[in-house]
Amino acid sequence: MIDELAADAARFGDDDEIRRILEEVAALTRMGFVAVARVTEARWIACQVLDQIDFGMSPGDELRISTTICNDIRESGNAVVIDDVSADPRWNSHPAPALYGFKSYVSLPIILSDGTFFGTLCAIDPHPRKLRGRTWYRRSSNSRTASRA
C-alpha cells in the first residue's frame, strides 16, 4: 500500500513540463542523471527522473534521506553546486558522492508558492563538470516552474 507522501510524489512522475525541464538541465549541464525529488525531514522520493547513466532510479524510488545532499539543501534552503567532489573540501568527505558514485552535483531547492519547501531539482554525473558560473545556473527559475506543476 502506497502512503500519502509517496502518492503525492508519484503524481509528478509523468509530467511533460517537468520532463522538458529535466531535459534542458541535462543538456545545459551535460549531466547524465536529473530528477525532481520530494524531500522531507524523513524521506527522499524521486518524482520524475531522466536517467542517461543507468543510475537505476525510477519515479517513486526512495533514498535514505541521511545519505543525500538534498537533505542539506532542505535544511539550508540554498542551492549546492559541485564541479568536482574530489577538489571540493566542503563536500569531498560527505558520504553521498562515494555511495552514489558521482563526481559532479547540482541541486536547487523547489519552493512552493506558499513558501513551503517541496524538494529539489538535482543532477549528478560520474564525471567532473564545469558548473559554477555557467548560464544554466542563472536559469534557476526552472525549479520554481517545477514546483507549480
Image (spheres, rainbow, N blue to C red):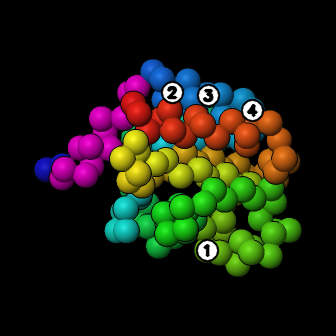
The crowding category of the residue bearing disc 4, from other C-alpha atoms within 10 Å (few below 14, some 14 to 19, many at least 20), is some
Magenta range = 3-15
The kind of residue on which mark 3 rests is Glu
- Above or below, 14 against 86 in this view is above
Q: Is residue 50 left or right of residue 118?
A: right
- Asked if residue 34 shows in the view, the reply is yes
Residue at 31% over, 39% down: 10
Which residue is at the front of the view, 142 or 6? 142
Label 3 vs 4, first from the N-terminus: 3
The crowding category of the residue bearing disc 3, from other C-alpha atoms within 10 Å (few below 14, some 14 to 19, many at least 20), is some
Query: Is there a contact, CB below 8 Å, between mark 1 and mark 2?
Result: no
Residue picked out by circle 1: 95
Residue 73 disc label: none
Q: Main secondary structure of the magenta part?
A: helix
Label 4 vs 2, first from the N-terminus: 2
Label 1 vs 3, first from the N-terminus: 3
Residue 28 disc label: 4
Query: Is there a contact, CB below 8 Å, between mark 1 and mark 4?
Result: no
